[in-house]
Image: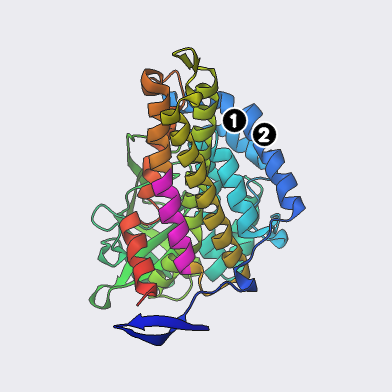
Amino acid sequence: MVQGAGVSGNLLAPITVVGVQTMSDVYSVPQEFLDFRDTIRQIATERIAPRAAEIDATAEYPWDVRRLLAENDILSLPFEPEYGGTGTGTLMLQMGVEEIARVCASSALMLMVQELGTLPIQLFGTDEQKQRFLPKCASGEWSPAFALSEPEAGSDPGAMRTTAVEDGDEWVINGTKNWITNVGIADFYVVFATTDRANRRSTAFVVEKDRSGLSVGKLEHKLGIKGSPTGSPVFEDVRVPKENVLGEPGRGLGVALGTLERTRLGAAAQAVGIAQGATDYARHYASERITFGKPINEHQGISFKLADMETGTAAARELLYKACALADRGDKLLGKYSSMAKLFASDNAMRVTVDAVQVLGGYGYVTEYPVERYMRDAKITQIYEGTNEIQRLVIARTMR
């Protein structure tokens, strides 16, 4: 803490200034991370970008992209070496998400859900559960899903209606989830179900896709992120053994919140990537589009817009990387900074992509050019992994 002077009426009074930067606030990006990032960028640019418009237009899951990410160890980024992962931590993971999202937000979601669907097992699972599920995800053979939200329980998970009842050595799950990424693709689901309604307590379970009674309901027709299926898994008397309980019975909310505190950084990274991709395209277009005898990036109205787009995205990246560094250190400030990173990056992505459409004018409004896709994809980053209204609530609570 630093003592300074403050004004109280006409008198000088001492005040306390908090939040002064310390060494714990500093982060660095190792050269090996930069090298891996450049490799991911090259793969994304050369192999994924040419597929992005088709993925969006057909709304089909790009299995070829998933194989590409697996073959290049990108799907192993969320995992430790003992499970076949790179062991490179949160910062490198989100740098990877960012680079893929620069060209195709749907493909970036593959890497995001790799963390979202397995982090509950990494953080709360038994050794047996980790050995059973994580290696096959790290190799890309399996893909997970995270099933928390319901039609009437989004931001308020305590209101969930899916139930699990203990029956001998098994639990019987009934209910319907909604807005679940990877539905129909996932090999297993981390499912949250109410096990003590009177006390609003829930429990987390791992449910394999071939369990009797598990089916896929409707798929959503979405504004953006069309290459990643979103829908409603239905559980009708689905039986799972006690060995599939994650963490302690009745502590499911802690599993969910402990996971989302980290995985909302994926949404922030995706938002940074979308914003950078839109900025790059708008900048290139503005350098070639001629009006009144000169490129439009020489007109102040456009050049200032591009400057704001670049500045906002750079600021979002700095906040994201700092939050990632806090996650890798296990810092107690992670919850606040992950919420701030997600909030700022997603709001910036929406502003930037709207401005990118404006820079292109009429061309920005047609599917022949990618900025309208960036704009549609950006919107969801303000909603999933906790709406931005919830992020503001989380941040505000840390300031009391």
Which quadrant would residue 216 be assigned to in this image? top left
Tell me the residue that label 1 is attached to: 48
Instruction: Tell me where residue 246 appears, x and y as whole percent.
Output: 48, 68
Which quadrant, please, contains the C terminus? Answer: bottom left
- Give me the residue at 45% from left, 44% from top: 182
Tell me the residue that label 2 is attached to: 43
Q: Mark 1 to mark 2: distance in Å?
A: 7 Å
Q: Is residue 279 left or right of residue 355?
A: right
Instruction: Tell me where residue 378 appears, x and y as whole percent.
Output: 41, 40
As helix, strand or loop, the secondary structure at mark 1 comes to helix
Magenta part mainly helix, strand or loop?
helix
Which stretch did the figure color magenta?
Answer: 335-348
Q: Is residue 342 magenta?
A: yes
Q: Earlier in the sequence, mark 1 or mark 2?
A: 2
Instruction: Tell me where residue 117 appears, x and y as whole percent.
Output: 50, 55
Query: Foreground: 349 or 175?
Result: 349
Disc number for residue 353? none
